[in-house]
Image (cartoon, grey):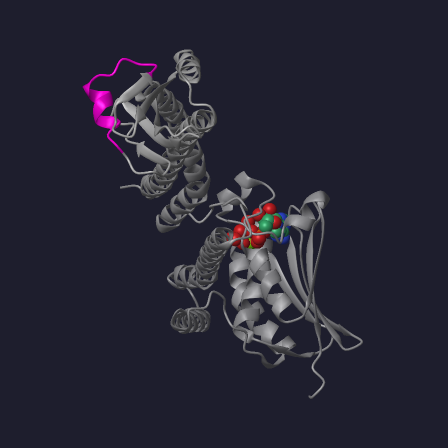
Amino acid sequence: MKFSTKLGLWFFFCILIIETGSMLFLHQNVVHSLVDNEMKSLLARGDSHRDVLEETFTDNTLQHIVLMESKTDTEVVVTDTSGRVINSSIAINNEIKSIIAPISNNNQIIETDWESQPYIATASPFSSNSGESGTVFMLKSTSQMKGLITDLNHHFGIAVIIILFFLVITNLVLVKLLTKPLVSMKEATKKINEGDFTVTLPVISKDEIGELANSIQTLASNLNYLQQERKEFLASISHELRTPLTYIRGYADIGQKPHLLDTQRMEYLKIIHEESIRVSTLLEDLFELAKMDQNSFSIVKEKIKLGEFLQLIFEKARPVFSNSGIDLQFYIKKECYVNIDPLRFEQVVQNILDNALKYSDGGTTTIKLSKQDNTCELTISDEGKGIPEDQIPYIFDRLFRVEKSRSRLTGGVGLGLSIVKEIVDAHEGELKVSSKIGVGTTVSILLKETQNK
Ligand SMILES: Nc1ncnc2c1ncn2[C@@H]1O[C@H](COP(=O)(O)OP(=O)(O)OP(=O)(O)O)[C@@H](O)[C@H]1O
Ligand SMILES: [Mg+2]
């Protein structure tokens, strides 16, 4: 059974029981005070007749009393002490006889059973100044009272139906209001369970239900963030693995060509060997990260001679560039010591070189290292297609490509420079790009020189 139905039924039955109980109590009280009133006024009327008779007990008075009662809905029977009827406003039949049995001297309510008896009755014994005594009986037909109470029941019935109607309406509205946030939370958790973390729950209230909705929302956002982070990380990993594998494939291709000098073949094999070590280091890193459940590479800095470091990369890249008809050059103006993670920083240089290679047709690409006021500046300039000026601010965004079709042809996905930026930021370095369409692009990285040489 649905929670809303259960809650609705609970509400309904609880309020129904309370309502029935109070209605019955009220009805009982109203009937009781109605009958009580009738009895009292009947007795008061009998008593006033008794007073009159005690003062002047004459035939005339008796006639007068009977005449008075014959005009009302009450009846009077006057008997003497032996129970003989002296006068009455009603014909005496057996029913009346059984009511007016002789009684003791006190004023009495002698018949109250309005439900099953034809009359309710009171008795007011008298003893006149002139020595006569007896009893004034007052009777009132119960049929009129029954009619009155039937009317009352009718009104109560209508009231009960109206209250029930409003009870059902209120119940439905209340249950809907109470269960609506619960239902939307159920839907949300179902979505989360199915892997869709983009749920949004409206802020309903500040109570426990509101807090619960808030927690679910936070949970979904966190999961969404984690999933996003994981996706981005996986994309970065594949990107980072792709570059060394491209080198390996490229040099394996070149190395297979006949008529190669042994020294050249050895050089290519060395590069293949180095790159395969890079791949396995990256994979080991990855394995460590998976164990630590982290979604980013850690940076392990060490003191590096930047010129030497770039020289190695330059030598590795030169054959690939010359294979594509690009002249790769390297200048060191001044050697510079920096604190960097060599594995991660090699990725930075390779990604920038990869762009120079992809987006140039011939020309020269220059790697340059210089130093100014304890700041090492590494620039890589190409003579390629260039980047439109208005697009430069976006090239570090993930998955951004200037010309979607051009990049697709060259196999780029728009991750290279975003990875570059991430790593340079992690080294507290500065990254600058200037470019001119048809002239070329220059990427510079500024790094603080380490003091402790
Ligand atoms: N040297 C460059 N010359 C011309 N355009 C460039 C150059 N470097 C980057 N770009 C432009 O900036 C975009 C983003 O570069 P990024 O390196 O991030 O991605 P990509 O090279 O397309 O793909 P990936 O590097 O992931 O293989 C490129 O698609 C390209 O349009
Ligand atoms: Mg790239």
Q: Please tell me which residue is depicted at 38% across the width and 46% down the height of the picture.
A: 186
**Up-down: is 411 above or below 378?**
above
Q: Position of residue 290 (x, y in %)?
A: 39, 69
Q: Is residue 359 visible?
A: no
Q: Is residue 173 visible?
A: yes
Quadrant in the rendering for residue 437: top right
Question: 439 and 39: which one is in front?
Answer: 39
**Up-down: is 360 above or below 427?**
above
Q: Residue furthest left?
A: 94
Q: Position of residue 78 (x, y in %)?
A: 34, 22
Q: Please tell me which residue is depicted at 61% across the width and 58% down the height of the picture.
A: 327
* Residue 34 lies in the magenta-colored region: no
Q: Position of residue 20 (x, y in %)?
A: 35, 37
| Drawn side of residue 314 relative to residue 237, left or right | right
**Up-down: is 54 above or below 404?**
above
Q: Residue furthest bottom?
A: 452
| Drawn side of residue 432 relative to residue 22, left or right | right
Question: 112 and 335: which one is in front?
Answer: 112
Q: Position of residue 1 (x, y in %)?
A: 26, 41
Q: Please tell me which residue is depicted at 31% across the width and 42% down the height of the picture.
A: 6
| Drawn side of residue 183 relative to residue 207, left or right | left
Point out the image quarter for the C terminus.
bottom right
Chain part drawn in magenta: 88-102
Q: How many marks?
A: 0
Q: Residue furthest right?
A: 373
